[in-house]
Amino acid sequence: CVCVFVCAGLAELRAKFEEDKQRIRKLKDTRKFRPY
């Protein structure tokens, strides 16, 4: 059923979104220590 694929895709997108947020947070932290 299509719903299963949609749910799996949403979960994957959500996981990637969380990773991106953490990555951005790390970038902001490093930027604090080394302002350009």
Image: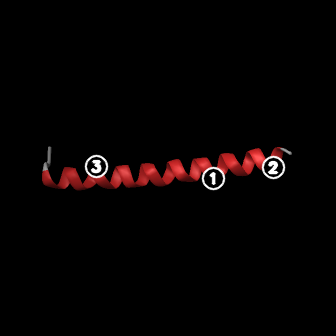
User: Would you say 36 lies left or right of 1 here?
Assistant: left
- In primary-sequence order, the first of circles 2 and 1 is 2
Relative to the observer, which residue lies in front, 33 or 35? 33
The location of residue 32, given as percent across then percent down, is: 18, 55
- In primary-sequence order, the first of circles 3 and 2 is 2
Gap between marks 2 and 1 measured at Cα: 12 Å
| Residue positioned 13% across, 49% down in the render | 34
User: Would you say 31 lies left or right of 10 here?
Assistant: left
Specify the amino acid type for callout 3.
Leu
Identify the residue under disc 3.
Answer: 27
Color style of the picture? secondary structure
Identify the residue under disc 2.
Answer: 3
Identify the residue under disc 1.
Answer: 11
Element type at marker 1? helix
The location of residue 7, given as percent across then percent down, is: 72, 52
The location of residue 26, given as percent across then percent down, is: 29, 53
